[in-house]
Amino acid sequence: MEAALRGAGVRLTRQRAALLRVLAAAEDHPDAGELHARARALDPTVSLATVYRTLGVLEAEGVVHRHVFEGGAARFETADMPHHDHLIDVETGQVMEFRSDRIEELQAKIAAEHGYELVHHRLELYCRKKTTA
């Protein structure tokens, strides 16, 4: 991420370094406000504007993925993770990652049946916990 910032001509300040540490450590899908709060815990001078500007550069450089799940704020994750899909709990907003070889194969097969080669995809499942009767 540091190289991406430098490559885009953006200085690596103490505040941006704090944000990069937070992004690298995130095991969830934080939004900008959550990233801001976490970065401020490391460096109280981090501004929300710095978070947004830095995220924009990192997204443009392809090192951070921005997800806008239905009904929520944009959430972020580093792009160095292996491909995965997302399951979103519609009641809590919790985002869970999963991978299914069967789904991957089916998507490639569908694309091929229509004369295409699958290049990229994003799958989001919006779910509610089952209640037992």
Image (cartoon, rainbow, N blue to C red):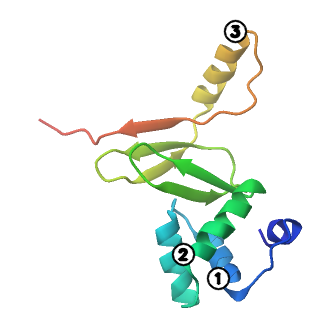
State the image coordinates of residue 119 (x, y, percent, origin top left). 76, 30
In the structure shown, which secondary structural element does the residue marked by tag 1 occupy?
helix
- Is 126 left, or right, of 121 in this rendering? left
| Residue at x-position 64% and y-position 82% | 18
- Is 94 left, or right, of 29 in this rendering? left
Label 3 or label 1, whichever comes before in sequence order: 1
Q: Nearer the viewer, mark 3 or mark 2?
A: 2
Label 2 or label 1, whichever comes before in sequence order: 1
Whether tag 3 and tag 2 are in contact, CB under 8 A, the answer is no
In the structure shown, which secondary structural element does the residue marked by tag 3 occupy?
loop
Tell me the quarter of the picture where residue 131 sits. top left
Q: What is the three-letter code of the residue carrying label 3?
A: His
Label 3 or label 2, whichever comes before in sequence order: 2
| Residue at x-position 74% and y-position 58% | 63
State how many labels appear. 3
Tell me the quarter of the picture where residue 61 sits. bottom right
Q: Quadrant of the C terminus?
A: top left
State the image coordinates of residue 27 (x, y, percent, origin top left). 55, 64
Whether tag 2 and tag 1 are in contact, CB under 8 A, the answer is no
Which residue does the numbered mark 1 point to in the structure image? 18
Disc 3 from disc 1: Cα separation: 46 Å
Decide: few, some or many residues near mark 1? Use Cα within 10 Å; few <14, some 14-19, many ≥20.
many
Which residue does the numbered mark 2 point to in the structure image? 48
